Image (cartoon, rainbow, N blue to C red):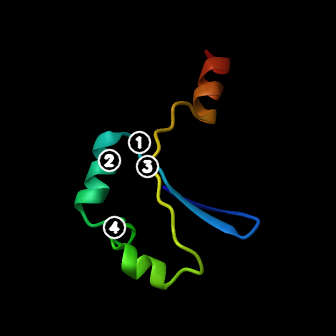
Amino acid sequence: MVRRAVFGNTLCDFEAFPDLAGRQAHVDGGGGDIFRDVTRMNAILAEVARVHRVDVLMSKDYFAYCKAG
């Protein structure tokens, strides 16, 4: 799942996967290659990019599940 958000003049792309295996399959399949090619990525951006890998600890789906149960 890919989500895009804009905060002021900052563009954020979020890629989310159901589990670590899904995220690893995406990386192994070439997904996100541009993020590892810093020279190419920064050539198309107005400012130097910052890439962060984060783990989502909880989601809205979790809260909906808790309320239903």
Q: Which mark is residue 36?
A: 4
Residue 6 at x, y = what percent? 70, 64
- Mark sitting earlier along the chain (3/4): 4
- Mark sitting earlier along the chain (1/4): 1
Residue identified by numbered label 2:
22
Contact between labelled residues 3 and 1, with CB atoms less than 8 Å apart: no
Contact between labelled residues 1 and 2, with CB atoms less than 8 Å apart: yes
Contact between labelled residues 4 and 2, with CB atoms less than 8 Å apart: no
Three-letter code, disc 4: Arg
Crowd band around label 2 with a 10 angstrom C-alpha radius: few (<14), some (14–19), many (20+): few
Contact between labelled residues 4 and 3, with CB atoms less than 8 Å apart: no
Relative to 53, 30 lies left or right: left
Determine the secondary structure under disc 1: loop
Residue identified by numbered label 3:
53
Three-letter code, disc 3: Arg
- Tell me the mark number nearer the camera, choosing from 1 and 3: 3
Crowd band around label 4 with a 10 angstrom C-alpha radius: few (<14), some (14–19), many (20+): few
Q: Using the image, determine if residue 61 lies above or below residue 69.
A: below
Residue identified by numbered label 1:
18
How far, Cα to Cα, is label 2 from label 3?
A: 14 Å
- Mark sitting earlier along the chain (2/4): 2
Crowd band around label 3 with a 10 angstrom C-alpha radius: few (<14), some (14–19), many (20+): few
Determine the secondary structure under disc 3: loop
Three-letter code, disc 2: Gly
